[in-house]
Amino acid sequence: MSFRGALRSFAAAGRRIEREQQRRAREATRHYKQLQKQQESANAAEAVAQYEDYLSVIKSIHHDCGDTIDWQRIWNEPAPVRPPRNNVHEAAASAALEGYRPGLMDKLLKREADRMDQLRQELEKAKARDQQERTAQVDEYQRQLDDWRGRQELAKACIAKDQAVYQQVLEDFNPFDGVSALGSQLGFRFFSNLVEVDLHVNSPEVIPDFILTRTAGGKLSRKAMPTSKFNEIYQDYVCGCVLRISREITAHLPVDQVVVNAMGSMLNPATGLIEEQVIVSVAIPRATLSRLNFATLDPSDSMRNFNHNMKFAKTTGFQPVSRVAPVGGRP
């Protein structure tokens, strides 16, 4: 198996574990897009439940993360053992042939020779069966050996901090599917012990600008979301994405730091144009990230744990900020 083939096989196994997380994000996004177009619903309770599920996905995007890949453990994996030759079927058939003693009926019917021929034929069949099983065992061993060699080459490259391999790992594992399903795009810059990410957030499509509730009479009520509430959800979503991206990168790559620059479309007063500008910039060391409890923390408040730039008010939302430098500088 080729280097890239081993990576794809390895990544496919990892993605199977994460499919439920990604499926929920895609389903919630699909339902939300439907709700954006709906003014009424035949089932108000279902519409409200879908709306609340989408908000839950947005607010908890930092909860999920793929399993950490221990590249050193993979590098230390022993090679598969070549299966020993096994002639179990031949041995049994040979013992039956050598141990044959004509019985009374064989002697009376004079079928000793036929019985011996039959046992010799069974011996040849047993040899063929042993050979068939041996071929299948060797083929499986060779497949396992190729997989092992591919993983060894991949682990060696990651431990050596090969930046080109970093990119291939993220492309094949695609751990950000749950983020992209909610409308964000990512750009990467790879260094030996650092990954810098530009997170392009499309807030109008991601954050609801309306609130759905069910009236006492069972009808669907749709109201405009207050600006302060919209901004609060948007801030938590952006910071949650920052955490999720950092978690996924440190889970998949042996780097000690991730710098995330969240980009939002904002009015540039100098040009009078809507432009993409940095709204959150944060340098996240692996050691600090590993100490956080993601199930209970507030994404926006958690930025205080890191060197970061963020200017935010509930009434006005984000303001442009400068990019932070990695802790300790770039390699």
Image (tube, rainbow, N blue to C red):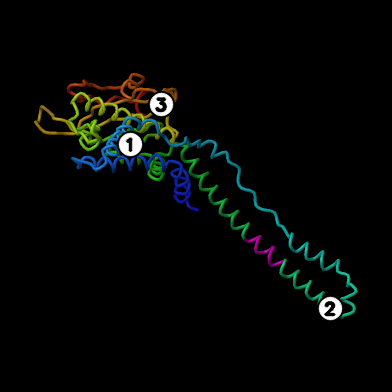
Q: CA distance from mark 3 to mark 1?
A: 29 Å
Res. 113 mark: 2
Res. 189 mark: 1
Q: Which residues are magenta?
A: 127-135
Q: CA distance from mark 2 to mark 3?
A: 79 Å
Camera-nearest residue between 297 and 220: 220
Q: Amino acid at mark 2?
A: Ala
Residue for point 90% across, 74% down: 104
- The mark that comes first in sequence, 3 or 1, is 1
> How many marks can you see?
3
Overall secondary structure of the magenta stretch? helix
Whether residue 132 appears in magenta in the rendering, the answer is yes
Res. 315 mark: none
Res. 295 mark: 3
- The mark that comes first in sequence, 2 or 3, is 2
Q: Position of residue 328 (x, y in %)?
A: 37, 23
Give the residue furthest to the front.
217
Kindly state the secondary structure of the residue where label 3 is placed: loop
Does any portion of residue 185 appear in the rendered image? no
Kindly state the secondary structure of the residue where label 1 is placed: strand
Front tag of 3 and 1: 3
Callout 2 crowding tier (Cα within 10 Å): few <14, some 14–19, many ≥20: few
